[in-house]
């Protein structure tokens, strides 16, 4: 068995769930993104045996991190602004 880009790190397992929330299809493209994200985070937390609150909180943190990365990398801030609006939706789902 081979590992691709393995990183010898330990930490909160809920940190890793964020990409799965968005990579199946764009939850923010749904008319009720908050409901979709609430449902997805609950399903994912259950499947992983993780606390749904932690999965949601990490999703917010990682989405904000990504938005800030785009501020630094992109000349056009339109994507960054969109990502921050999405982070706000995630924060509402997380109760933050």
Image (cartoon, rainbow, N blue to C red):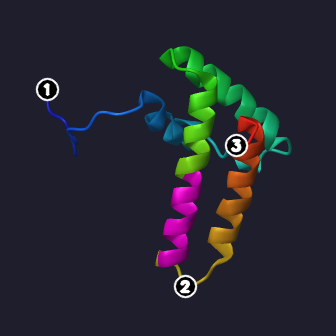
The image position of residue 43, as x and y in percent, is 63, 20
Name the residue tied to disc 1: 1
The residue closer to the viewer here, 5 or 55, is 55
Name the residue tied to disc 3: 27
Secondary structure under the numbered disc 2 in the rendered image: loop
Name the residue tied to disc 2: 75
**Distance between mark 2 and mark 3 Cα atoms:** 26 Å
Q: In this view, does 32 lie to the left or right of 22?
A: right
For the point 35% across and 34% down, the residue is 11
| Crowd around label 2: few <14 · some 14–19 · many ≥20 (10 Å) | few
For the point 70% across and 43% down, the residue is 27
Residue 66 lies within the magenta run: yes
| Crowd around label 1: few <14 · some 14–19 · many ≥20 (10 Å) | few
For the point 72% across and 45% down, the residue is 91
The image position of residue 19, as x and y in percent, is 50, 42
Nearer the observer: mark 2 or 3; the answer is 2
**Distance between mark 2 and mark 1 Cα atoms:** 41 Å
Q: Is residue 88 left or right of residue 73?
A: right
For the point 49% across and 77% down, the residue is 72
**Distance between mark 3 and mark 1 Cα atoms:** 33 Å
Res 2 quadrant in image: top left
Reading the chain from its start, which is encountered first: label 3 or label 1?
Answer: 1
Which dot marks residue 53? none
The image position of residue 31, as x and y in percent, is 85, 45
Q: Which residue lies furthest to the left in this view?
A: 1
Q: Quadrant of the C terminus?
A: top right
Residue 91 lies within the magenta run: no
State the extent of the magenta-drawn residues as a range. Answer: 63-72
Reading the chain from its start, which is encountered first: label 2 or label 1?
Answer: 1
Above or below, comparing residue 49 to residue 70 in the picture: above
Q: Residue furthest front?
A: 96
């Amino acid at each position: 068995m081979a590992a691709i880009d393995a990183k010898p790190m330990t930490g909160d397992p809920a940190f890793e769930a964020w990409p799965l929330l968005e990579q199946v299809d764009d939850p923010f493209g749904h008319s009720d993104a908050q409901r979709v994200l609430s449902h997805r985070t609950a399903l994912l937390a259950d499947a992983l045996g993780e606390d749904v609150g932690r999965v949601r909180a990490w999703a917010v943190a990682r989405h904000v991190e990504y938005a800030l990365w785009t501020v630094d990398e992109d000349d056009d801030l339109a994507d960054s602004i969109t990502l921050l609006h999405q982070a706000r939706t995630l924060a509402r789902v997380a109760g933050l």
